[in-house]
Amino acid sequence: MFKRLLTVSGFTALSRVTGFMRDILMSYIMGAGAISDAFLVAFRLPNNFRSIFGEGAFDAAFLPRYAKTRTQVGEAEAARFADAVYSWQMAFQAVLLIVAMVCMGWIIAVMAPGFAHRPGQMELATSLARIAFPYLIMTVVAVQLSAMLNAIGKFAAAASWSIFLNVAMMAALLSAKYFPNVGYAAAWGVFGAGVLQYVFIVGMAARSDLRLKIRLPRLSKEMKGFFLAFGAATIGSASVQISLFIDNVIASFLPAGDLTALYYADRINQLPMGVLGVALGTVLLPTMSNLLAKGERVSADAEQNRAAVIGLMMTLPFVAVFLAVPLPIIHAVFDRGAFHLNAAAALTSAAALTAYSVGLPAFVLLRVVAATFYARGDTKTPVIATMTAMAVNIALKIALVWGLNFGAAGIALGTALGAWVNVAMLTKLATGRKLLTVGPVFTRALLPSILAALAAGAGAWYGVGIGDALAMRGGIVHALATMGCAFVIGTSAYLAVVLLFCRRLPLGRLGRR
């Protein structure tokens, strides 16, 4: 598992790095203001629908059934099932695209009602959303082919196609002078990315003899079972997206630029969460599905425990660092160009990053614990937990933002605490049904993981102090010097503790040596 995890996390990390480059370029060119707020609302719309109908819900309903059919019945029957799902999905996506394009003005008005008080921003967001939304129908094809590739153990192509979004957007941003404004450039970059991703994943799947064909949709008994599972998982995914929708609504009433500042804080938080969380979920779900289909419960439990340890071991140090030095991170990554012109943006992003980091381990563990149910074809139970967590999430955000005046940081903290509620509920339900076993792999590695994280946070804090002393105050040189020292010392301290306890950690051959 560790080798497969490295493959997925490596490509996912490359995607996140290029995504960081895209965000740095976007913050430099677009800044934090009315145009960036309008684009981010437009950009979030297809991404929200993709999260509802894409990786989360779709993988949970499709992948275990596809893997089981392929293992127990054969490749031909699995291909027929995949084609049936694809045909229904394309029919639905075509209808959704038409309805969204016609009703886009009303959709944006609901998503960001605060824009109505800013002249021209509602119209701009609507225009940008109409350009970016067709990205959805192209990317859902990539999602299904990725699930099929993962089911046969081919993880690299499925983990790498998202890189095209970052490349296409960077190219479009650098060509912004040819568009009415930089928001239009970024929106057309999203559309172009959908085309590139589609071409790439279709080609890579064909090399593994995996193809999707449109057939006349039929509501067979098999498809009814899929739709029941998909419907339950979709409700769960929609609950998460409703929470993000509430974020948009609340942030649209905050000062101009706060929505953008919140986005950049989330992007930094998403780096470890996206790399580790996505990689763990991508590898663990098909692994557990195949093992359980063969009746190997003990092996499935062992893989899950190992995944949980790796998730904590790799995310806890980020929590410590984000809590210790949030402002220097924002200064080093984003605070330049047009972003620097908004004096409050860096402080707002730093406060939001601190709040987001509280939930970072929860988001990663959520992928691991949810696999307990998804690998068994149970998509209903995670929905119950997710909807409960969503209600807590929304209530907390309203209280923190409008009750306690926490601003953008209140939105982030509500998200983090809601994630912990979700994990706690799923863990309680899984242990109550004797589906989740905490093994010695997890208990043995927990304390070393916490100690390594504390060492990383202390090292980063100390490194910022050294960087302050070495570099001239102010400017990009100072920001990069402080973060460079923080990175070197924090990483060194973390690795020293990991090496000290390497025999208690699931590090493959390194641990055995």
Image (tube, rainbow, N blue to C red):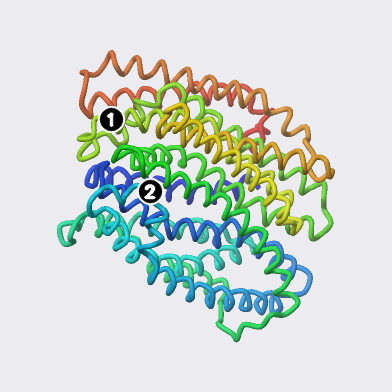
Residue at point 56% right, 77% down?
212
On the question of residue 209 being in view, the answer is no
Disc number at residue 19? Answer: 2
10 Å crowding of disc 2: few (<14), some (14-19), many (20+): many
How far apart are the two marked residues, 1 and 2, measured between alpha carbons? 24 Å
Residue 412, how many percent across, how many down?
Answer: 47, 35
Residue 383, how many percent across, how many down?
Answer: 67, 52
Q: Quadrant of the C terminus?
A: top right
Horizontal arrangement in the rendering, residue 281 relative to residue 68 (left or right): left
Which three-letter amino acid code belongs to the residue tagged 2? Gly
Q: Is residue 93 above or below residue 146?
A: below
Label 1, secondary structure: give it: loop
- The part of the image, by quadrant, that contains residue 310 is top right
Q: Nearer the viewer, residue 361 or 507?
A: 361
Which residue matches tag 1? 344
Residue at point 71% right, 42% down?
426
On the question of residue 433 being in view, the answer is yes
Q: Nearer the viewer, residue 492 or 429?
A: 429
10 Å crowding of disc 1: few (<14), some (14-19), many (20+): some
Q: Nearer the viewer, residue 503 or 253?
A: 253
Residue 482, how many percent across, how many down?
Answer: 32, 23
Q: Nearer the viewer, residue 112 or 415?
A: 112
Residue 133, how many percent across, how many down?
Answer: 39, 65
Check whether the beta carbons of the residues at disc 1 and disc 2 lie within 8 A of each other.
no
Q: Earlier in the sequence, mark 1 or mark 2?
A: 2
Horizontal arrangement in the rendering, residue 164 relative to residue 449 (left or right): left
Residue at point 74% right, 66% down?
68
Horizontal arrangement in the rendering, residue 292 relative to residue 466 (left or right): right
